[in-house]
Every structure is written in structure tokens, then in C-alpha cells.
Image: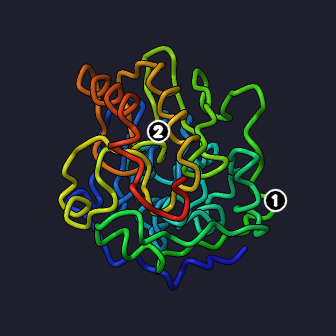
Amino acid sequence: MENEFEERILPVTSVANRMGLNVAPDIYCYTDQIVNLVFIGTKDSFVLVDAGMPRSSTEIIQQAEDHFGNNASPKAIILTHGHFDHVGSIIDLVKTWDVPVFAHDLELPYLTGKASYPEGDPSVDGGLVAKMSPFFPNHGINLENHVQPLPKDGTIPGMDGWRWIHTPGHTKGHVSLFRDADRSLIVGDAFVTVKQESLYKVITQQQEISGPPKYFTTNWDAAWNSVKELNKLEPEIAVTGHGHPMEGVFLREELQKLADHFDTIAIPEKGKFVH
């Protein structure tokens, strides 16, 4: 395995960079530049959801040790999808921790070197991040035999009480994670809580519910259906791939609004994947 993202750095950060937040006793959200990754569990057993930006493995490992103790290592790494900002440090983390990685089987071609994602589409929005998106890494990575498909029965290795939900649209094999007991939702990029196309809003982390990042989303009908399915769960807490976590009545009202008006809130007026 080689870290092909090592020389690729997104020169954008936010006011939340390197900030952590306990959103529940066993859910810790950590922001790496502009993307969130999530530690779920306790000192005795925890998993990592997503793997942050390139060149972030040292700080991610340090976060694990600060939160769970010296030499802490997760039972597994779960990937919501394989875009560069969610797998940027996965190669180095796997080399250090030697733990299995799980993703939806439709995402495996992008994680085993067999496929690359489409380039970012700058025409979807006037925001500067969208304009920069063609320069973002879009190639797949090769985790070789370290990655395997999530169990077909919806369970998640190392995450008792949680289930994965296929939420395609942003990517073919995108998944979100849900715990019925307290209605906690790890969204990935099925929807986010910051307008990810706007550089100003990304930097300031101005909170607003939004659809998946427009410049990398390839199937808008599927993306809308995924939001509708997540809305039916009536989550109490939602940790998204980008933006601050949302919770309670505010979350449910905003998510209902997104599900009802996805065509005007989320879908761009133009773009190569807009039909």
C-alpha cells in the first residue's frame, strides 16, 4: 500500500480545525481541517469512522490516545465512502494500527485501485470551493486485502447496536450509520450542515443544513431518496461529514425541510450530473 495522497494537500481549513466534541458519552467528533471523523466506543473497544485529510495520521492517532489512552487502537475503521477527504490518512493509519477496514461493496472498486471517481464539477455552484474542486484528488486508493465489505445483514463490526444504511447519491456505495436505541446518526456526506461549496462558509463553519457536496455528487435522484430515508429515522443527533453536529427538534425540523425541498435547497441548477 502506498499513500498516493501524501503530496496532495487541500489548502483550506476552518475555525473548527483540530477541535473535538463529545456529542454523546461514546461518540466523539473530531474536525480535521474541514472534514469530521468520529470515534465511537469506550477505552475497552472503539472504532473510527472515516480517516480524514491527507497527512493527518499523526494527529488522528494522537486524538485516539488522548481520548482512549496510550497505544489505543480501534477494533476497525468504517468508511462512509472513499472520497479523498474521508480516506486521506487511511493508508498510514492501517500501517500503524493493522486493523480491518469496512465499506459498502459498491465502494470497494475505489478502495482497491480498480476505479476512480469523476473529477469535481466546478459548474454546480458559484462558490470558490466548487470552483477549486477539479484540482481535488479523485483517484481511487488501493487498500489491498485490508478492506472488506460491510456485512450484508446491516450490522457493523465493532459497533454493537448500530446498523449501516445504504445512502447512495453522493457516491454509489455511500453509507450512513444509525443506532436505534438513542437515534444517533453518523451521516457521512449524505447531507451536511455547512454549505460546502462556499469557501467563506467552510472557513467560518456557518451552520445550515445542506445536501451532499455538489461538486462530487453524481446521482441527485438517489441523493434525494437517501435524505428522505434518513429523515424517516427522526434522528436525535446527527454528525455529518462537514459542519457542526445537529440535534433535537432543530435537527428534525431542518432535515424535514431538506427532505421536502431538496430540489431547491440541494440540487444545483446546472452541472454535468444534473438531469
Which residue is located at x 35 percent, y 25 percent? 256
Q: Please tell me how crowded label 1 is: few (under 14), some (14-19), or many (20+) other residues with Cα within 10 Å.
A: few
For residue 190, side relative to residue 162 (left or right): left
For residue 257, side relative to residue 176 (left or right): left
> What amino acid does circle 1 point to?
Asn
Dot 1: element: helix
Q: Are marks 1 and 2 in contact (CB under 8 Å)?
A: no
Q: How many marks?
A: 2
Q: Position of residue 21 (x, y in %)?
A: 29, 42
**Relative to residue 54, is residue 186 depicted above or below?**
above
| Residue hosting label 1 | 145
Mark 1 or mark 2: which comes first in sequence?
A: 1
Q: Alpha-carbon distance for marks 1 and 2?
A: 26 Å
| Residue hosting label 2 | 187
Q: Nearest the camera: 247 or 75?
A: 247
The extreme right residue here reads 145
> What amino acid does circle 2 point to?
Val
Which residue is located at x 40 percent, y 41 percent? 263
**Relative to residue 167, is residue 103 depicted above or below?**
below
For residue 193, side relative to residue 7 (left or right): left
Q: Position of residue 188 (x, y in %)?
A: 48, 45
Q: For residue 199, which quarter of the picture?
A: bottom left
Which residue is located at x 48 percent, y 75 percent? 136
**Relative to residue 85, is residue 154 depicted above or below?**
above
Q: Position of residue 254 (x, y in %)?
A: 28, 30
Dot 2: element: strand
Which residue is located at x 57 percent, y 46 percent? 169
For residue 17, side relative to residue 159 (left or right): left
